[in-house]
Image (cartoon, grey):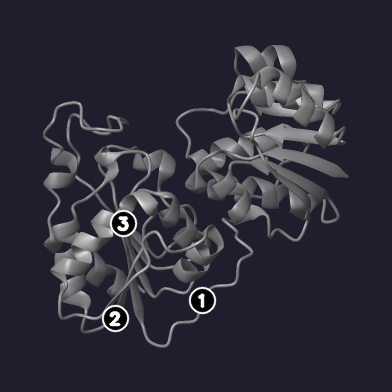
Amino acid sequence: MTLLIILPNWLGDAVMATPAIESLCAVYPEVQLTLVGSYVAIEALKYHPNCVRHYVDTTKKGGNRFRNTYRFAQLLGRHDRAITFRNQLHSSLLLLWSGTPLTLGRKSWHSSMLLSHPIAPKHPLHLVEQYAAIAQGLEKYPLPMGKLTLFIPPHRYERPTLGINPGATYGSAKRWYPEKFADVARSLSDRYAIVLFGGVNEVAMAGAIEAALEGIGVTNLAGKTSIEQLCAMIGGLDLFITNDSGPMHVAGAYQVPTVAIFGSTNYTETSQWGNPKNIIVRHDLACSPCMKRECPLKHHECMKGITAEEVIGAVETLRLIH
């Protein structure tokens, strides 16, 4: 069977789609996957052993997107089945124009017109469960629930290592503060080597943490890793402290002990999936989760109110449990 999959755009969302993909691969172990997605999604998932083709979707770049989407669909060609994890008009058109007879996606005005099987996941559900519900539309019998899975071998560190991820691509409302991350790292530096992570837009945050930890050995990888390297380096950690972010879900795929700091986002939908070695630190405020990129009330209390001591306490609890 050939299966075309349109991946979610964000790194974390793409990782959260892997249980749905693994459930289909469990039922069809010989399935040949064609993966389409953003650069970061493809770089993380293209190593799947069933992936025979992968493409970065560039239909937004240059010219008419509808024309670009049609031409891309002709390149992809007909598959036995196709599924999109994006709720987006051009993704529905891409599946339709590929000529694939059985197509699935989240139910919406466009998917109801363009796809053979528009699926409406029940709410509220974790995003992993929502993606799994879409995949279930392919099958008559219940699919086994897969796990978060990445096929990039983890890095092997020479000593116990703590990873710090102060960024979150979506926006500042999701980010805890560099000085607080530094306080936590300082308190744990006698037990762990410290590695800082971040994208090219988060170099300044990682730099602020590194400066605050002067005199303590720190490896600062912010802006210096490929997606493959990022996944490998996170996968080998002994402890990860992070905001709600794509790297948080990468850590979940490798079952890395994780303390995740949540503020503006809904932890019931986007927390780590299937990792028993994780603790969420959050404050239950009337205004959260607001789901905004920036604090609409300008006080950012959902993050500002979380102390370094709370996060350190979560680390100690995690160590006692595991």
* Side (left or right) of 61 relative to 213: right
Mark 3 vs 2: CB contact within 8 A:
no
* Side (left or right) of 128 relative to 107: left
Residue drawn at point x = 38 percent, y = 53 percent: 200
Q: In this orientation, does residue 313 appear?
A: no
Is residue 176 placed above or below 179 in the rendered structure? above
Which one is nearer the viewer's eye here, 5 or 258? Answer: 5
> Residue 50 appears at what percent x and percent y?
78, 56
> Residue 321 appears at what percent x and percent y?
33, 72
> Which mark sits nearer the N-terminus, 3 or 2?
2
Identify the residue under disc 1.
155
> Which mark sits nearer the N-terminus, 1 or 2?
1
> Which mark sits nearer the N-terminus, 1 or 3?
1
Identify the residue under disc 2.
192
> Residue 8 appears at what percent x and percent y?
57, 38
> Residue 214 appears at what percent x and percent y?
15, 75
Screen quadrant of the N terminus: top right
Mark 1 vs 2: CB contact within 8 A:
no
Is residue 213 placed above or below 8 in the rendered structure? below
Q: Amino acid at mark 1?
A: His
- Residue 266, by quadrant, is top left
Element type at mark 3: helix
Identify the residue under disc 3.
203
Q: Residue furthest front?
A: 62
Element type at mark 2: loop
Q: Residue furthest bottom?
A: 158
